[in-house]
Amino acid sequence: MFELVPALAKKAHVIDLKLCSVLFEDNALYPWVILVPRVANVKNMLGLCMEDRLQLMREIDLCEEVMAENFPHDQTNVAAIGNLCPQLHVHIVCRKKGDPDWPTTVWNNHSEPYKPEDKEANIAKIKRAIMIKQTDPKYMQGMHKPDYSTFE
């Protein structure tokens, strides 16, 4: 049975996609979501079947586009590192040049919680954008097929 590990269970829930739960990182310095595949006892991508790996990539792409389209940034960072948290999860963070940790990592560095009303507003904004974007056929499994007719 799938359960979030305690460190991830503390995060605010945004929305469930086909494979992943999208969680919100409460750090007002960086727009940040975390995708967690709802598959029991998976520590890294090796624990996913190929179909789930591909679905994870679709969902990462969807969420990275949502974050990039909705928050000012110079760079998006996408990372799946699980040395301390023993559950597969993927971070998507919008970074700006000159942010408190630029150009280094945001992990275990500067953090500032959102004001409660700003936190809820950002969660709602991300959820709405994901709901709209996931209707794009390129995110529907098996519906997006490349057009190879232009290749010779």
Image (cartoon, grey):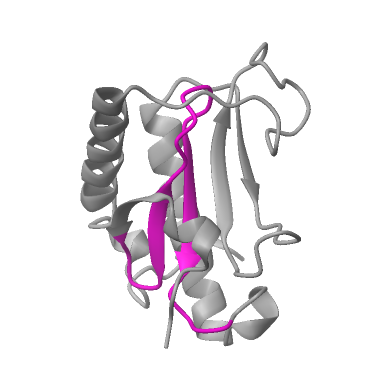
What residue lies at 43% left-to-right and 53% top-to-bottom? 10
What residue lies at 54% left-to-right and 44% top-to-bottom? 92
Q: Is residue 148 above or below residue 84?
A: below
Residue 123: name its quadrant: top left
- Would residue 28 be counted in the magenta stretch? yes
Q: Nearer the viewer, residue 68 or 6?
A: 6
Q: Is residue 36 above or below residue 74?
A: below
- The image shows residue 5 at horizontal and vertical percentages of 52, 68
- Would residue 65 be counted in the magenta stretch? no
Q: Along the horizontal axis of the image, is 77 left or right of 103? A: left
Q: Is residue 48 above or below residue 109?
A: below
Q: Along the horizontal axis of the image, is 116 left or right of 82? A: left
Q: Nearer the viewer, residue 66 or 149?
A: 66
Quarter of the figure with the N terminus: bottom left
First to last magenta residue range: 16-41
- The image shows residue 133 at horizontal and vertical percentages of 28, 49
- The image shows residue 45 at horizontal and vertical percentages of 65, 74
Quarter of the figure with the C terminus: bottom right
Residue 75 appears in view: yes
What residue lies at 43% left-to-right and 60% top-to-bottom? 9
- The image shows residue 3 at horizontal and vertical percentages of 44, 76
What residue lies at 41% left-to-right and 67% top-to-bottom? 20
